Amino acid sequence: MMNCEDAKPLLDSFADGELDLVNHVQFEAHLDECLSCDHTYRNTNALKNALSNDELYFKAPAELRMRIRSSLEETTHQSPWSGLLKWRWMPTMAAAVIVVVALFSSLAILRPSGKSEELLANEMVSAHVRSLMLDHATDVISTDQHTVKPWFEGKLDFSPPVVDLAQQGYTLIGGRLDYLGGRPVAALVYQRRQHLINVFIYPAQDQNTDGSVSTRQGFNVIHWTKSGMTFWAVSDLNTAELQDFTHLLQSS
């Protein structure tokens, strides 16, 4: 059985899909049992996905290209020692650029606006799919809101609102911890017939907003903020019923 000490050196290789079959299976089994390593992996994977997104890259304008060429022509007349000194600083500069890009990506996820909100919405869908594939929709299984809500105490730095909507046809089946947008979040799980609904909740940085509706990878996503909390509802439930569900949550 793999422990945390064994798992940590393999984290990057697992995220890149480079582990052999035996280590891959053992690492997955360890993530199912270790919340700390699972959170670290989710954070690493989220940052990797954010940095690989095409929206973070752009083509330099022609004016910048001309300025660089002009600068290169000027350096051809300088002493060869000056070029050597510049090359000595290249590793440090490259490391600084990587750190800045990583920080920018993390901040973009934590404070979604415009294109960065697109990245966060995709991350929510990925978390929804992951919970279904790993058969790990809930950490606490209960239809009682008074059981689910206290379970989060001491595990998060906020108290998520938990609403019982069974009479309206949306049954609470439990909750779990997840790691999205660079921070731990609460995930409430509801069921409508055979459809599961993940509701991701964490403190909001914006004022109250109405629900924005979108479809990604075949899943419907509704995002809104209310009473200092951000909500993301994700499901393969049809749009009309998912909107009905979110309206019930917002009015509770």
Image (spheres, rainbow, N blue to C red):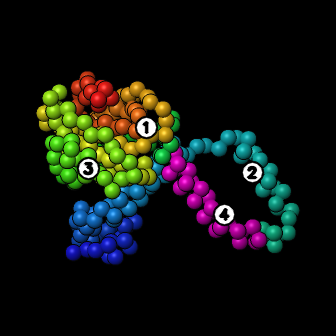
Q: Which residue is mark 3?
A: 150
Q: Tell me which numbered mark, 4 or 3, is placed earlier along the sequence.
A: 4
Quadrant of the image containing the N terminus: bottom left
Q: Looking at numbered disc 3 in the image, what kind of residue is underneath it? A: Pro
Q: Which residue is mark 2?
A: 68
Taking the spot 15% from the left edge, 42% from the top edge, the residue there is: 143
Under circle 3, the secondary element is: helix
Q: Looking at numbered disc 4 in the image, what kind of residue is underneath it? A: Met
Q: Looking at numbered disc 2 in the image, what kind of residue is underneath it? A: Ile
When the figure is inspected, residue 196 is found, relative to residue 88, above or below; the finding is above
* Towards the viewer: 191 or 159: 159
- Give the residues in magenta: 84-108
Q: Tell me which numbered mark, 4 or 1, is placed earlier along the sequence.
A: 4
Q: Quadrant of residue 64?
A: top right
- Tell me the chief SS of the magenta region: helix
Taking the spot 24% from the left edge, 62% from the top edge, the residue there is: 32
Marks 4/1: CA–CA distance: 40 Å
* Towards the viewer: 220 or 91: 220
Q: Which residue is mark 1?
A: 228
Label annotation for residue 103? none
Q: Tell me which numbered mark, 1 or 3, is placed earlier along the sequence.
A: 3
Q: Is residue 163 magenta?
A: no
Q: Which residue is mark 4?
A: 93
Does residue 215 show up? no
Residue sitting farthest toward the left: 193
